Amino acid sequence: MFGARWLVLAMSLLVVLVGGWFALGAKDVLYGTTVELPGTASARVAAALRRDFANPYAELAVVAAEGGTLTLADPRYRAWLEDVTTRLRAAPDVQAVTSWLDREDARLGSADGRRTLILVGLSSANVQEAEKATPRLRAAIAPAGEAMRAVDPAFQWATTGRGALAADLAAYGARDSEEAEARVLPVILLILLLAFGALVAAGLPLGMGLVATTVALGVIAVVGRYTPLSNMVQNVGTMVGLAVGIDYSLLMISRFREALARGLATPDALAETLRTAGVAVAASGLTVMIGLAGLAFTPSLDTRSIGLGGAIVVAVGVLMALTLLPAALAVLGPRIDSPRALARWLRPIDADAAWRRWAAWVMRRPFSLAFVGIVALLAMSAPLAWLSTKYEGSKHLPAHELEFHRGFDILEAMGKKNASTPIQILITATDGPILTPERLEGLLALSARLHADPRVLEVLGPVDLAPGLTPAKYRKLYKHWESLVALSPKRFEPILSRDRRAVTFSVIARNDVPFEGMLRLARDVASWAPPAGLAIELGGQAAFYNDLTDAVRRSFPGMVAFVIVATFLVLAFTYRCWLVPLKATILNLLSVGAGCGALVVMFQWGIGRELIGLATPTEGVPLSLLALVFCIVFGLSMDYEVFLISRIKEIYDETGDNAIATERGLAATGGMITSAALIMVAVFGGFAWAQLVVVKMLGVGLGVAVLVDATLVRVLVAPALMRIAGRWNWHPGGRRATALVAVVPAAEPLTDASPTAPRSAPAHTPRTPP
């Protein structure tokens, strides 16, 4: 590596430039929504609506408008409506448009005439295409809206619907990432300055974190051209990329400076760094990627995308730590401590001595400290007993900044809050046509049951063609149903399949039905016994989220088992023992429990929510988000486990004494682990002030879990348990013969009278804060 340092630097620079160029287009290939779940009822209904029906409104957008002083009775308001309708019909993404002008339908306007909605049928094949079409729709109608404001200054309009929500979330997610980076970068630099006491040494990890994130986003942008990826990759990719990029650099630079402080030449110091810290980085990266790979077991596009994107980010971080960083260290050499005047000013305390005292204190009372630490971890995990796994509706979205939400508010004022996300009921005849008189009774009964439900506002279907038509009139109309369909093809195209064997009912819930109520309504309808000779399946947003919840719940045990078993096997293979991996796995689960417990306390109970700008408690924590926290925390916690255990194992192989190895390993890595944890907490904490509540949840859950893991688990409970277990830690592998020379800074023998008696540190011994 030392001889090829300039070549590696040049190649790395090229990779960074190419990756940065591709990263600029990442937001264009990421989606703010998820895809249908294969094999579920909601996916079958969505496919049937596109395949079997001539329904131009299968992918629906809604333009909602509200006049300040004008009403639909005013010619100027109607002129605006006609202008927008004409513009929409000319747009390439639009198949059909229905407005109040078509039939002066009371359902498309408010009672006072100030508000109206326009139904826009998109040519999009799915909600992802609808998301990408939304900005073009908004641009097409914007001139008409601005012109109307010159007439009525209080006039408002907005494009809403599922695709609009996805587009707004994607844009807002990118903005959250940029703002979070701006918040945390100065804090990270300050922590690194305190950790290293040198400007160059502090700036290098920060630069590596930014480089790893940039290159990884470039790779993600390329992958996103071939497979759908959620925009959550951008948020989590930034979190994880900065965190692991800086952590791995911190470990490598710390080890390099130790070697230089012992008098090794730059090539020898670099070789030792790669042989020790480099191996730890590779092992740590593998365990983190295993944790993220567990998300491949989940069905959601969000979680699977984060698993794939996170693995890419970690792989790039490891690659950069083992190539670009060593090349930079080879070029810098002792200049890593530049400028030396600043380094001397930033070296007021001997933090290494403080960590040696801490390690000795832990070794003297391992049983009591392990007990107290485990009780504390269990107490922090206890709120999980009150966990509610619910999806949040639009209540916690930034209302004034999302156009989706502005349109949603207009619909709510019209009493049609849920009009853009109806529940779709697909009714299929098991044999023969469905609109025959003998099938009609079952359809009438279903419609009557839907109308009788207090949660239902409107039902649109084959026996709900117009207000005022009684069951008797429908029986008369459908005596000659084929003639009726032939006379009114446009009326029946959206609700009757081409083969005449299936119909759809669109159910719009009342204004006072929250999102969770929509989910319950969809579950209730899905449980109804179908009329004789008919089959029922549900689609739409509410049915999709019910299917998603069920699928995530089914996948959760397999995901957890994979992550635990795979991580255990990697650690067992790396350290040739079973007890150390077992303890690490159990402690990791407690760290995850602490992070998830914090979500219950802050988001469900509302304790401390003001600190992160959350106005009201949430109804619950989505199960898919818990899957994210579990996999990411389980992987990242292994970072610190590997950093600690690798150092302990090196010293154990050299000395053959587990107590000495544990004490010296903790003393050597405690400062680095806490510094790395503070950086990671700063990164995750920056996202706790994001505008999107799901990003807040992720930032809080990950930040608390990492803080607990690094401060309570890795520097207290884990070393205490290592001290208690003694030689059993390394059974059956035992001590490995090693040819490493001066792997650990020299220390005087430990005695009973003097548990820790290290010699004075060299002048340039690297320092880390307690």
Image (cartoon, grey):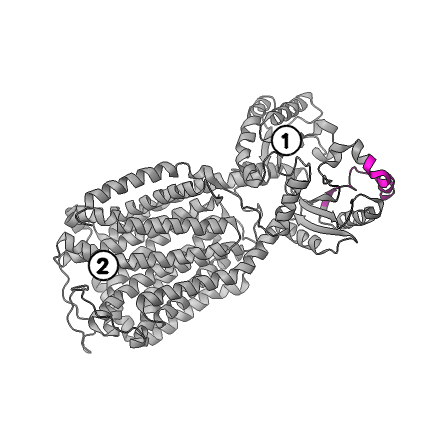
* Residue 614 visible in the displayed image: no
Q: Residue at x 60, y 25 (%)?
A: 90
| Image position, residue 118 (x, y; %) | 65, 32
Q: Residue at x 17, y 57 (%)?
A: 259
| Image position, residue 686 (x, y; %) | 40, 48
Q: Amino acid at mark 1?
A: Gln
Residue numbers of the magenta segment: 457-483
| Image position, residue 428 (x, y; %) | 73, 48
Q: Residue tagged by mark 2?
A: 275
Q: Secondary structure at mark 1?
A: strand
Q: Does residue 318 appear to the left or right of 159 in the view shown? A: left
| Image position, residue 532 (x, y; %) | 79, 54
Residue density around tag 2, few if under 14, some if 14–19, many if 20 or more, within 10 Å? few
Q: Residue at x 35, y 68 (%)?
A: 572
Q: Is residue 459 magenta?
A: yes
Q: Is residue 553 above or below residue 692?
A: below
**Residue 487 vs residue 237, the one in the foreground:** 487
The quadrant of the rendering that contains the C terminus is bottom left
The circle drawn on residue 226 is none
Q: Secondary structure at mark 2?
A: helix
Reading the chain from its start, which is encountered first: label 1 or label 2? 1
Q: Residue tagged by mark 1?
A: 95
The quarter holding residue 567 reads: bottom left
Marks 1 and 2 sit apart, C-alpha to C-alpha, by: 63 Å
**Residue 494 vs residue 383, the one in the foreground:** 494
